[in-house]
Amino acid sequence: MKKIITTFLVLSLFLLNACAEFADIWGANPNTAAKEKPAHVRKTAGDRKKGMVYVVEKDETMQTIAQKYNMTPAVLAEKNNMAEDEVLYEGQRIYIPTKKQLAKNIEEAGGVAAEEEKPKFMWPIDFNVSSGFGPRRGRNHDGVDIPAPTGTPVKASRDGSVLFQGKLSGYGNLIIVKHSGNYFTAYAHLSVIKVKKDQKVKQGDLIGNVGHTGRAKTPHLHFEIRYKTQSTNPLLYLPKK
């Protein structure tokens, strides 16, 4: 049931917003219900002199804080000896590692499995990113834009099943694939969709072609990786070029 609810929320996020940048519509996370503050503050992992201490605000979660610092919830949780879904309380102090420290552990980001299973995700097209993840023109860009000629084959980034395929306002022709571990990938502005809803796909399978449908002015692929309902930086999961 929990997985079904997560799937519904992810799909609702696209259906309700219908554009490449989203406002935060989630509100309070059910996992952030009021929790009595413990008698002592948890000691955080790592050397604080090499990072910083963040004071948790009301209703914040591991996912929302990780997004602020351009990392995945799994990395933030690991650096604090916490569980990824652990309930945080207002005023709690957690450790934020530096970018240099994150670089050393980049392949551990996002709960990536054992070394022999890496990379968990692959590039859907082999072109360079033109617009990255994060703030853009006053809003949050929830994925990366990858320019490529119209018709360029788009491949599934990881094994999964098609959660949604069809037209969606600003996204144009869109495919959302659900993966194990509550991860989702999205492929937008396609010229052609080559998969059906509920179809099983393998990493590297052809699922569509690059286009400029929706709000895209030039041919490119808008690509997202989400953990549950939280947008994350795809570059943390993809192999370095």
Image (tube, rainbow, N blue to C red):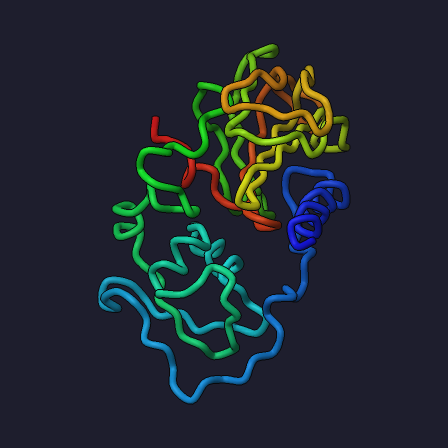
Question: Which residue is drawn at the image coordinates 63% and 31% (left, top)?
Answer: 161
Question: Which residue is drawn at the image coordinates 54% and 47% (left, top)?
Answer: 227
Pinpoint residue 19: horizontal percent, then vertical percent.
69, 38
| Vertical arrangement, residue 149 with respect to residue 156, above or below | above
Q: Quadrant of residue 193?
A: top right
Q: Nearer the viewer, residue 200 or 105?
A: 200
| Vertical arrangement, residue 35 with respect to residue 139, above or below | below
Q: Quadrant of residue 58?
A: bottom right
Pinpoint residue 13: horizontal percent, then vertical percent.
70, 46
Residue lying at the far front in this picture: please name it: 1
Question: Which residue is drawn at the image coordinates 53% and 70% (left, top)?
Answer: 87
| Vertical arrangement, residue 169 with respect to residue 231, above or below | above
Q: Nearer the viewer, residue 213 or 223?
A: 223
Pinpoint residue 151: horizontal percent, then vertical percent.
60, 10
Q: Along the horizontal axis of the image, is 122 left or right of 168?
A: left
Question: Which residue is drawn at the image coordinates 58% and 47% (left, top)?
Answer: 140
The C terminus, quarter of image = top left
Q: Nearer the viewer, residue 33 or 170?
A: 33
Pinpoint residue 194: horizontal percent, then vertical percent.
67, 16
All told, the count of numbered labels is: 0
Residue lying at the far bottom in this picture: please name it: 39
